[in-house]
Amino acid sequence: MVYLDYSATTPVNKEVLDSFSKVSLDFIGNSNSLHSLGVKNTKLIDEATRQIADILNVKENEIIYTSGSSESNNLAIKGICLKYKNRGKHIITTNFEHSSVFGPLEYLKKLGFEVTIVNSDKYGQIDIEHLKSIIRDDTILVTINAINSEIGIKQPIEEIGEILKNYKKCFYHVDLTQAIGKINVDLTNVDLASFSAHKIYGLKGIGCLIKKEKVLLEPLIHGGKSTTDFRSGTPAHPLIVSMSKALRLAVQDLDKKYEYIASLNKQLIDVLEKYDGVSINSNDKCIPHILNISVVPVKAETFMHALEKYEVYVSTKSACSIEGSLSESVLLLTNEITKAKSSVRISLSHLTTQSEIEEFLKAFDKCYKELKKI
């Protein structure tokens, strides 16, 4: 099997799974309980929180545990807008966001909020000057992902933060889902940041929202004690501890991992760009972990399933996208509907081996020739 869909989800690291299993079996209490078993679990959570805070250079009380990035994005966006709606109802975002950002924005539109899309350049990065020009007195939120999940476009989140820190009524949310464990991130001028454990070799069902200390939110889930006032529910201490472990492992040797993945990416491009009808949609402003290509005029799902026959697994777009739809991100970037309908996402990891790359290229060649005949 050749797995090249790491941007959708990652295999669980055995050390992370061991942490989850040990905590689940040895620490059976509810951390909200006042007896000694509950206190032990609270100490475990506190230690995990300290470790996450140290890695991300944030305060411990700025960490909110969620079920994943979708909940984190919803809590950040809805929470800010509902809490501070008296300040204004204007939101700024990009056309390259995940569905868990577009979803709550559409919901807020029904409540009278206005959403403005900032312009992007030919690489998909936002136009900084246009961003400055569309910030208004009633703008309360700018939400921008660090890395686009389909093409891998990297946004200048630190530069944006430097600009927005001068707008005291406006909050800045960054979706870090595809960035954590892949690139270094600086959250100094970011008010809210989302990520999920299952993208960094952790378990599904646990995520995080960083919310800076002075920022308030309207909770989405009410009713009951937890690790924070902003998200009720019994703390999932085995998942929390395992996510801390996953994050620690993910950021180890980050530069070395990046260089290795970049070499694999280059190898793929050098071969794939020689095929007639194959277009490389990812560009120099993209991280190497994601390589988006189009095989025109073959439909994306057709090529994906053809590769699957050789036990090679890639995807057509974000795993949360509507089945059968074209890639909106590719359409926006290339302005070519044929490329958007035939785009395939290859996502790499430091776990990807040289032999897997070679197996993929052999399978790709066979599928390309078979489908070209048809």
Image (cartoon, grey):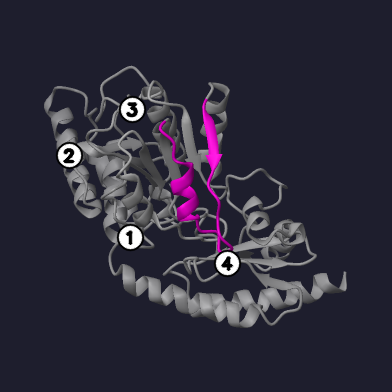
Query: Which of pointers 1 and 4 lies earlier in the amino acid sequence?
Result: 1
As measured in the structure, the alpha-carbon distance from the residue carrying label 2 to the one carrying label 4 is: 40 Å
Looking at the rendered structure, the kind of residue marked 3 is Leu
Looking at the rendered structure, the kind of residue marked 4 is Ser
Q: Give the range drawn in magenta.
A: 113-137
Q: Is residue 191 left or right of residue 8?
A: left
As measured in the structure, the alpha-carbon distance from the residue carrying label 2 to the one carrying label 1 is: 20 Å
For discs 3 and 2, the disc positioned in front in the rendered view: 3
Residue 316, position as x, y percentages in the image:
65, 57
Q: Name the residue under label 2.
A: 46
Q: Mark 1 points at which residue?
A: 250
Query: Which of pointers 3 and 1 lies earlier in the amino acid sequence?
Result: 3
For discs 3 and 1, the disc positioned in front in the rendered view: 3
Residue 246, position as x, y percentages in the image:
32, 54
* Contact (Cβ within 8 Å) of mark 3 with mark 4: no
Residue 168, position as x, y percentages in the image:
30, 36
Looking at the rendered structure, the kind of residue marked 2 is Asp
Q: Name the residue under label 4.
A: 282
Q: Is residue 307 left or right of residue 134?
A: right
Q: Is label 1 in a helix, a strand or a loop?
A: helix
Query: 370 or 194: which is nearer to us?
Result: 194
Query: Which of pointers 3 and 4 lies earlier in the amino acid sequence?
Result: 3
Q: Is residue 209 above or below residue 356?
A: above
